[in-house]
Image (tube, coloured by chain):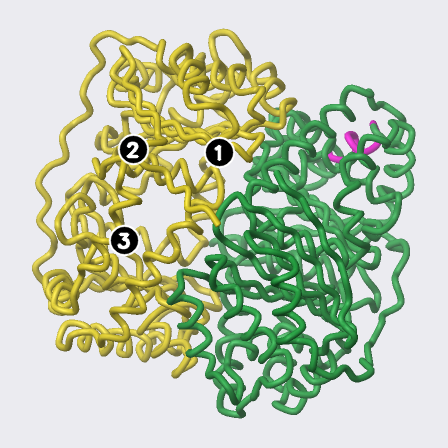
Chain colours: A green, B yellow
Amino acid sequence: MQNTLHKSTLENGLQIYLKEIHTAPIVSLWLWYDIGARNEVPGKTGLSHWVEHMQFKGTANMTGQEMDHAIARVGGYWNAFTSQDWTTYLETLPANHLELALKIEADRMQNSLFDPDDVEMERTVILSEREGAENDPLFLLGEATEALAFQTHPYRNEVLGFQADIESLTRDDLYGHYKNYYQPQNARLCLAGDFDTPTVLKMIEDYFGAIPSHPVKKNIPTPEGRITQTHHIELEGPGDAHFAEIVYRSPAANTNDFFAYTILDSLLAGPSSLNMFGSGGISNRTSRLYKALVENEIVAGVFAGINATIDPGSYSFTLICRPDRASEDVIKRFDEQIEDIRNGNIKKAELERAVKQAKALFVYGADNITNQGFWLGYAPSFADYNWFLQYIERLQAVTPEQVIAIAQKYFSPDERVVGFYNPIKKD
Amino acid sequence: MSQNLPHAGNILRTSFNNSSTLLAWHNSTSPAVVIQGLLPPGTVADTPGQYGLANLTTAMLMTGTQKHDFQALHEKIESLGASIHVQSGKLMTSFALQCLAEDLPTILDLLTEILSQPAFPEKHFARIQSQILTTLAIRAQDTAAMADQAFDRLLYQTHPFAHPSIGYAQDMMALTLDDLRAFHSDYYTPQNMIIAASGGLAPEELTKIVENTLGAWHKTAPQKQPDLPDFFPPTKSQREHITMEDKSQTDLIIGVLGPKTQGDDFQAASIANNILGQFGMMGRVGESVREKAGLAYYVQSALGAGLGPTPWQVVAGVNPSNLDKAIALIKEELHKFICMPVTTEELEDSRAQAIGRLPLALESNTGITRSLLSMERYQLGLNHLRDLPAKLAAITAQDILTVAQRYWNLDTLIISSAGKEIA
């Protein structure tokens, strides 16, 4: 596998990451902006996500439909994602059509129209998106527990934004957000695939080199430390299924704690994959919580997944509960497993297995060129690309003592949010 | 730049003594291997009063074999960072594994045990039943799943496909381990099993490993699962709304019986479907319902594939107050679709897309094995991917209009939805 990595910065501040991979005649382009829900302020939640939608509506040079059809016509696909920390745009397409993606991204970095009619149309679409999410009890429970896991930090808000904010945001709010954040110096252009680096660098300079950068006025929130008490919340809703979420603070990705925390996550609930595409998954039937809770019929299922975030974030265990088990009993049995680790009961073999699983997930993710393009920009959003390259090595260096220390530091029963979703009792 | 599509010259196709067939392809850049496969039976073997038997049987396969109990089995799989999945489909049971290439013999051994020598341990039975009950409870609150279930009920009526693969709670809870053992003994067989493999092993080496595992599974005199009865779709429109209070979004399906995957109409229908509700931001219906009217977060069309009768649908997620407007707009688009030929631009765009995306579909081992499996299952030939561009390029606007008119009879539309009560 060829892994030639090129990194440079244009004069206007645009960072360039290029990785040649010649296994298939395709290329994946990712353009990352360092703007997400994390940078939003109360009353204006959902701005980053809505701006992402508006980027598909066209510029003075190309309508949204023309862009869309041009990508589709060559057999490519495009998409975008907004997270707490970033917004990213991707095109994966046959390698000989790379220039089309560069042209579109350079154009919509500076020329998107934000037509008022389109803004209003998209308001309905985004409200529909939120309504679809609200159909899921786990979305409602997650939104409620996150709001308690942070006092003021924007991680407490859903990326979609609050309904009241979506209803009141204006075209000026959206356009101002766009003009402020969508600039070369706030962006990373990442390409993985079948191309020649010098040729592509010339193309990038031609399309992006002349785009001016202005100072970015960015709202940087103050990171929050511990969850200072135990919060309990119970929601009621339709259905027959019971759920629980138990939320702890997680460390920022660019800290040593993150790697021991990742091992702890794997031991308790099975390995998490940070890949966005093509990694497959490894089941969690030999994880501690599955053995203790699912096999013993305390709950029907247990899942967790660590996120790599800029600031300290939240880490949630999701339990699919059984109607015949009292919530106190579920929490008691859950806590026994956490306490076991906090008391120092960890074997080195468990760590070795967690590392082997992480290595396998790493290999599966590398199988997919789109996923390789994702990592070029994702890792620098919270650290740098070396974070990705050294990921396995840093996991290997974790000791049982470090995992125990992490459990003691982050998994206190007095510093968490416990939420339940219970079906409304039927008459 | 190299164009390295799988074709007859680089796919190794082998039939084993047990009547199973392997298609193997070498992905020299991958240190991993993916295998996918299909074998009898499917949920069509379920009988009235026992709907969910096939699904419960596959769920129990993963609880232990005659050589490995639950913990030993999963310890071996997970400690290698591998995965094995088995799932019931309507006509076949599917399996999939992913592992590092050096671990393939171990993981294939385990998969063979899981399929051929399950233990059906008593101690896990109630737990698995309970987990399926929970899945059913979660499904019952999923508007998309409920709209889909209602659609199948309306379209297939008395045909076995009318029933959800997961079955019904009452039937599932009445099943016994003896039912499962008998079902496995009767129907699970390597005869006609199809296996597709792609990854970092030479095809000859990969074939040898499969021959010694899945290829060495022999079973005498399995029962043949019941033949599918003839299917006659409804002759008039059907409409059902599932009321689910406190749901913010309503899921909607409008559809008809689609063409056979192996039939002459399928390729033209796939281009037609692309124009109707796939191309770009979801084709004509996406442009009309989402982009212009702003009525839905998602709307698209879907052409079913399979060896039995499969639907052709338009699906959407809408605000409950917009449901009627969305139905009217989609019907309007369908009316245009069957009255006027598609434009030259639409046809050229969709044909070009279908041809251009071939390399993208083969980006990963999973994508490659999926293609290999289709080649064998639908008897498309090993040169299918190489021949497909020419076939697609030959499709005309008249071909599109013909299939649109043949299948989208607006007097026999099946419309299902699930969400808040309709005013």
Residue at image coords 61%, 80%: A166
Q: To which residue does mark 3 refer?
A: B389
In the displayed structure, A389 sits above or below A194; it is: above
- Label located before the other in sequence (3 or 1): 1
Q: To which residue does mark 1 refer?
A: B27
In the displayed structure, B106 sits above or below A151; it is: above
Magenta segment includes A335: yes
Distance in Å between CA atoms under marks 3 and 1: 23 Å
Q: Which mark is residue B247?
A: none
- Which amino acid lies under the numbered mark 3 shown in the image of this protein? Pro
Q: Which mark is residue B8?
A: 2
In the displayed structure, does residue A358 sit left or right of residue B418?
right
- Which amino acid lies under the numbered mark 2 shown in the image of this protein? Ala
Badge 1 element = loop
In the displayed structure, does residue A321 sit left or right of residue A249?
left
Badge 3 element = helix
Distance in Å between CA atoms under marks 2 and 3: 16 Å
**Rendered location of residue A222, percent (x, y):** 89, 67
Q: Are marks 3 and 1 in contact (CB under 8 Å)?
A: no
Q: Main secondary structure of the magenta part?
A: helix
Q: Callout 2 environment at 10 Å: few (<14), some (14 to 19), or many (20+)?
A: some
- Label located before the other in sequence (2 or 1): 2
| Chain label for disc 2 | B
Q: Are marks 2 and 3 in contact (CB under 8 Å)?
A: no
Query: Residues in magenta?
Result: A334-340
Could you say which is closer to the camera, residue A387 or residue A316? A387
Residue at image coords 18%, 61%: B395
Could you say which is closer to the camera, residue B388 or residue A134? B388
The reply to whether residue B417 is in sight is: no
Badge 2 element = loop
